[in-house]
Every structure is written in structure tokens, then in C-alpha cells.
Image: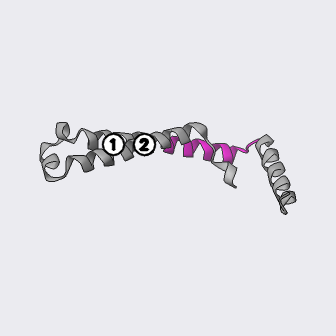
Amino acid sequence: MHRYWWFKKKYNMALEEFEKEELSDREKGYLRMRSIMDYGMGVLWTGMGIFAIFIKKFSADLAEKYDSTAFKVFGAVCIIYGLFRIYRGYKKNYLRDR
């Protein structure tokens, strides 16, 4: 048996009690603000990724200056991060780490 079993038991019980508590108006406002910010930033990051992947259609001059593969890799990373931000805004798990 783990020697800190009592700590884990106490921590898990505290987390379960926290999830059952009602949120105050201030916490609800914080959740709403963070969620909206995550949605907005997710859309911006995803849009930037789409722009980077299809750079030749938007700006031929910029596409000629830089490597096409680098733009596509950067665009894919931006899209993945943007989708993560949208998911995080949907889940709203902000107060669980406090």
C-alpha cells in the first residue's frame, strides 16, 4: 500500500466535495469570460492555420518567400491548437485546479 494513502483519500474527497458545491456569481462570470475567450482564440488560431496551409491562394508573394512545407506544418499545429482551445472552452474545466 502506498504510504501516503491518507493524503490521496483526503484529496479525492475534497475534489468530490468541490464538484458538488454551487458556484458563486463571480465564479460563473469567470467561467463565462474564459469560455468566450477560448472560443474566440480557438477560432483565430484555426483561421491562422487555414491561412498558413492555403497561403498560395491568399498571398502569392508571401508563399514564394518561404518554404511551403514549413507553412503547412505551422498551419497544422495552429489548427490543432485552435481546436484544443475550442474544446477547452466547451468543457469549462477551469476551477478544478484551484
How far across and how far down the image is residue 66, in percent? 18, 52
Residue at position x 13%, y 48% from top?
A: 64
Q: Label 1 crowding class (10 Å Cα cut-off): few <14, some 14-19, many 20+?
A: many
* Relative to 72, 39 lies left or right: right
Q: Quadrant of the N terminus?
A: bottom right
* Mark before the other along the chain sequence, 2 or 1: 1
Residue sitting at the far bottom: 3
Residue at 39% x, 41% y: name it: 79
Image location of residue 19, percent across then percent down = 76, 43
Q: Residue tagged by mark 2?
A: 80
| Total labels drawn | 2
In the rendered structure, which segment of residues is drawn in magenta? 22-38
Tags 2 and 1 in contact by the CB under 8 Å rule? Answer: yes
Does the magenta-highlighted stretch encompass residue 28? yes
Q: Quadrant of residue 88?
A: top right
Q: What's the residue at 67%, 49% (across, down)?
A: 95
